[in-house]
Amino acid sequence: MNRSVLLETFHSSREIADRGTVTVATSWSHPQRGPVTCPAHPLLTASAGHAGFNTVTRALTTRDLRHRLRPGPSAASTVFAASYENPTGGVVGFAVAAHPADRHALAFAREEVAAWRTVLRTRRLLHTSHPHSAPHTERQSAAAALPSQGRDGRPFRWRACGCPVTTACPAVDNAVSTIQRFQSRGDEVVLIGRSPLGPLPLPPTLLQAPPGLTVCETADQAETLTLTNPGALAFVMAPGAVTSQTTRILAILRRRFPRLRGQHPDQWCYTATDLHDAARSVMAESDVLLVVGQGHSPASTVLSAEAVRAGIPVHRIESLTVLRPQHIDASTVALVEAEATPPTCTTLSGLLAGLGPWSTIHRELVSRVTTHTPATHPANR
């Protein structure tokens, strides 16, 4: 693809841009290549506005452009342009025009087109994706799906386990009722792990009720845990805790306290576990992570943490004005939405289509719980 890239300057006798204004092409016509589509033009428009220029967006026709090595006395506009031949057909690029007498606008247009031209490349876009979960049955856990990151432009709110409130997830209620049941029979309860959105919202009565509730978030804490009655100990998993971490804690507690009893695994929520595993898989193949939109979601929180752990750059794109060429100067870009507020991953993917051929890959990891009912022996019926 890079061998087909052309960086060119055109001079036109037509007034395409006034002084103090830059004109960004929504499409343009190359003298030899023909029609050029410009999917990335909103990026250059946002950048021009952020730089303080008045901006105009419109299509540049064949009459607007004619190719010269240097401007003649009749030149009324200068157009800086980049284009490449798409392997699947057609020509893609971008163009910015300025008035020849406006030195500031000319410098901006030249430098901006040259900067975006440097990141014209073939790239992959990796999304974490997931289906919506089906309604939970009475004994089904919250394992059905990673949380949706927004739909129809409306941000979701999130449960303590990481599931959206639009998903029927009983994990939090199950945790509270199980803690109450264990405490009512005199057990000291250990809450294992931590949800992605912070501490589990527990009723004050649970925290104050004897014989007590202890939070154990790490393996080190499990090794040093002290109890008043080790023979009456029960555990409950924090909804949304990552099972690869909590099972290590549980193994330590079982070694130290052999009479430990616990919550039924059908009640565990695997949303954060699946999200954590998907994040590790995606970031292992990515060069950079773009967190798109405003706010925070479990997905953006988990992927950002995994990117930092892996030493991968993270850029928050709350508006198109903050996206710069160096943010996407990579062969594989991971995308995750913070919330369903503009811009979205769908919007950004469309814009990146104007910066080189791309392939979008949706990575999906889902754990589902199958509930087994013990068979009844005929003699006992």
Image (cartoon, grey):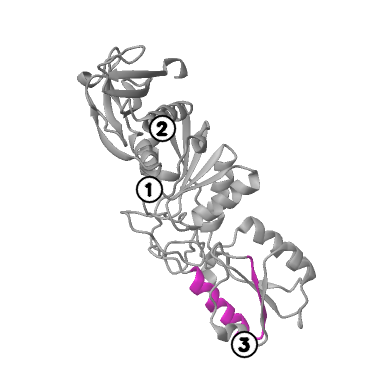
Seen in the picture, residue 328 relative to 168 is either above or below; the reply is above
Q: Which mark is residue 209?
A: 3
Look at mark 2 in the image and give the residue it sits on: 108
Give the residue type at disc 2.
Phe
N-term-proximal mark, 2 vs 1: 2
Q: Secondary structure at mark 1?
A: loop
Residue numbers of the magenta segment: 171-193
Q: In the rendered image, which quarter is residue 90 located in? A: top left
> Does the magenta portion include 158?
no
Q: Is residue 222 left or right of residue 30?
A: right
Decide which of 295, 196 is in the foreground and name it: 295
Q: Quadrant of residue 241?
A: bottom right
The residue at which mark 1 appears reads as 343
For the point 53% across and 43% down, the residue is 289
- Judge from the rendering whether residue 23 lies leftward or rightward of residue 145; answer left or right: left
In the structure shown, which secondary structural element does the residue marked by tag 2 occupy? helix
